[in-house]
Image (cartoon, grey):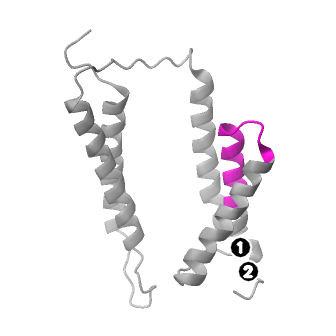
């Protein structure tokens, strides 16, 4: 074993910091309008970027302090089931972003969360459905109705709220 092997946490930490920086750069390009929500369009993306960067740095610091590090091996064939779930989750996230405006936040999020739950929480369809519905409605109420943020309503645009 090498003295300073590259571990899963090292790779994840570096990836998180780079992703957070890219997200931060993207956030800086969001136009700020006078008629925007009170919170502003950049606040939540700034929070996300900062959180991802901080988590990545903390992961790297934890690995730096850790004396017993195990080298990481990309065992694609041995763990192809996990990699397939990751790929399907990423594809679902892209599809979610593409249909979000058309279906609306509530419907698109229920479908997305149910699908990801189906991948991760195998065989518990009712539990996955309940979590997807409750999460979607709760977050919609929190962001759209309480915080008065603009959320895509899509197919439910006929509702009065």
Specify whether 60 is left or right of 143: left
**Quarter location, residue 91:** top right
Main SS of the magenta part reads helix
Label pair 2/1, CB-CB below 8 angstroms = yes
- Return the mark for residue 20: none
Q: Measuring from the top left, give residue 96's x and y in whole percent.
A: 64, 56
* Above or below, 10 relative to 111: above
Q: Residue at x 57, y 75 (%)?
A: 142
113 magenta-colored: yes
Bin the neighbour count of mark 1 within 10 Å (Cα to Cα): few under 14, some 14-19, many 20 and up: some
* Above or below, 124 relative to 51: above
Q: Measuring from the top left, give residue 15's x and y in whole percent.
A: 35, 40
User: Magenta part of the protein: which range?
Assistant: 108-125
**Which residue bears the numbered disc 1?**
154
> How many numbered badges does the structure rendering display?
2
97 magenta-colored: no
**Which residue bears the numbered disc 2?**
157
């Amino acid at each position: 074993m090498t003295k300073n092997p590259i571990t899963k946490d090292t790779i994840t930490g570096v990836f998180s910091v780079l992703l957070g920086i890219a997200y931060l750069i993207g956030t800086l390009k969001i136009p700020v309008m006078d008629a925007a929500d009170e919170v502003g369009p950049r606040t939540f993306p700034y929070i996300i970027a900062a959180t991802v960067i901080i988590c990545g740095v903390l992961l790297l610091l934890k690995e730096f302090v850790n004396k017993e590090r195990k080298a990481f091996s990309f065992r694609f064939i041995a763990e192809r089931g996990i990699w397939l779930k990751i790929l399907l989750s990423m594809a679902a996230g892209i599809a979610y972003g593409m249909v979000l405006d058309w279906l609306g936040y509530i419907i698109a999020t229920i479908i997305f969360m149910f699908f990801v739950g189906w991948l991760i929480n195998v065989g518990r369809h009712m539990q996955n459905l309940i979590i997807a519905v409750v999460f979607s409605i709760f977050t919609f109420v929190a962001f759209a109705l309480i915080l008065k943020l603009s959320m895509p309503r899509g197919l439910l645009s006929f509702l009065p709220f």
